[in-house]
């Protein structure tokens, strides 16, 4: 079984203890970062012994990769492509922005990937791969959505450029909000994307 298959198997098993560990690990990473997360603290949070955490996830790398994989799978369920209609595409993009704000900005933290990227040198290959695939999934979805907004044909490179700019706006704005405590920075940064369909008329 290759690494990806192992990760998928690990996240699909609905073992209550394993799910609780993954939930606690995600919360800990968002609050304190990857390096500060400890199996001892996770065990205390879940109400089990540290050895039990190691039983389900032998290493910190195994745990972080499983958290990232499940995070990606949960996110993928929300990325539904609408009909190829311009206004439907804009509505889908606005929902994408709203979901990001609700799950990241309004929770007073940055995204999991932003946290992990800041500690990239500490991460194992499986976690880095899962994070890369997560971004690729969002990037492809955004590029497709943007292409639906254009009257007529849009070159692939143009759609991809917009996708990169949207992702950069969301993540950059979330960091700015986290640093300043002013959520208006996020709203101002994403405002142009909420009316992108009008610019592509």
Image (cartoon, rainbow, N blue to C red):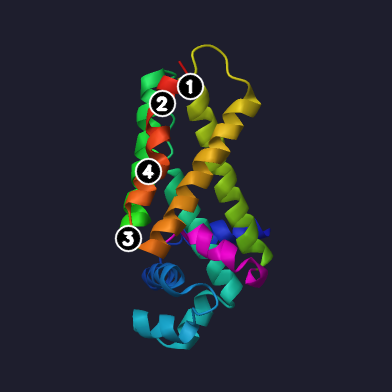
Residue 73 at least partly seen: no
Q: Residue at x 59, y 56 (%)?
A: 130
Q: Residue at x 31, y 56 (%)?
A: 106
| 83, above or below 118, in the image | above
How would you rate the neighbour count of disc 3 (Cα within 10 Å): few for under 14, some for 14-19, many for 20 or more? few
Percent x, y of residue 15: 40, 67
Residue at image mark 2: 89
Q: In terms of depth relative to the viewer, which is nearer, 143 or 171?
A: 171
In screen coordinates, is 122 left or right of 71? right
Q: How far separated are the C-alphas under marks 2 and 1? A: 6 Å
Are the residues tagged 1 and 3 within 8 Å (C-beta)? no
The earlier-in-sequence mark between 2 and 3 is: 2
| 106, above or below 139, in the image | below
| 169, above or below 162, in the image | below
Q: Quadrant of the N terminus?
A: bottom right
Q: How far separated are the C-alphas under marks 4 and 3? A: 18 Å
Residue at image mark 1: 148
Give yes or no for residue 20 being in the magenta stretch.
no
Are the residues tagged 2 and 1 within 8 Å (C-beta)? yes
Residue range highlighted in magenta: 110-123
Residue at image mark 4: 188
The earlier-in-sequence mark between 1 and 3 is: 3
How would you rate the neighbour count of disc 2 (Cα within 10 Å): few for under 14, some for 14-19, many for 20 or more? many
Percent x, y of residue 163: 54, 36
Q: How far separated are the C-alphas under marks 2 and 4? A: 21 Å
Q: How far separated are the C-alphas under marks 2 and 3? A: 26 Å
């Amino acid at each position: 079984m290759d690494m990806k298959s192992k990760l998928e198997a690990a996240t699909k098993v609905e073992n209550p203890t394993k799910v609780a560990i993954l939930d606690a690990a995600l919360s800990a990473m968002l609050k304190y970062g990857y390096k500060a997360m400890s199996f001892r603290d996770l065990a205390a949070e879940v109400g089990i012994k540290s050895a039990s955490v190691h039983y389900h996830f032998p290493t910190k790398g195994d745990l972080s990769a499983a958290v990232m994989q499940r995070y990606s799978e949960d996110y993928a369920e929300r990325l539904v492509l609408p009909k190829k209609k311009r206004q439907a595409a804009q509505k889908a993009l606005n929902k994408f922005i709203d979901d990001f704000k609700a799950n990241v900005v309004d929770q007073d933290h940055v995204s999991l990937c932003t946290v992990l990227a800041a500690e990239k040198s500490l991460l194992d290959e499986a976690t880095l791969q899962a994070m890369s695939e997560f971004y690729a999934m969002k990037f492809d979805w955004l590029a497709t959505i943007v292409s639906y907004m254009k009257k007529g044909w849009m070159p692939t490179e143009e759609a991809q450029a917009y996708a990169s700019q949207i992702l950069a706006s969301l993540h950059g704005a979330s960091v700015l909000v986290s640093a300043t405590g002013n959520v208006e920075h996020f709203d101002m940064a994403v405002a142009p994307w909420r009316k992108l369909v009008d610019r592509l008329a």
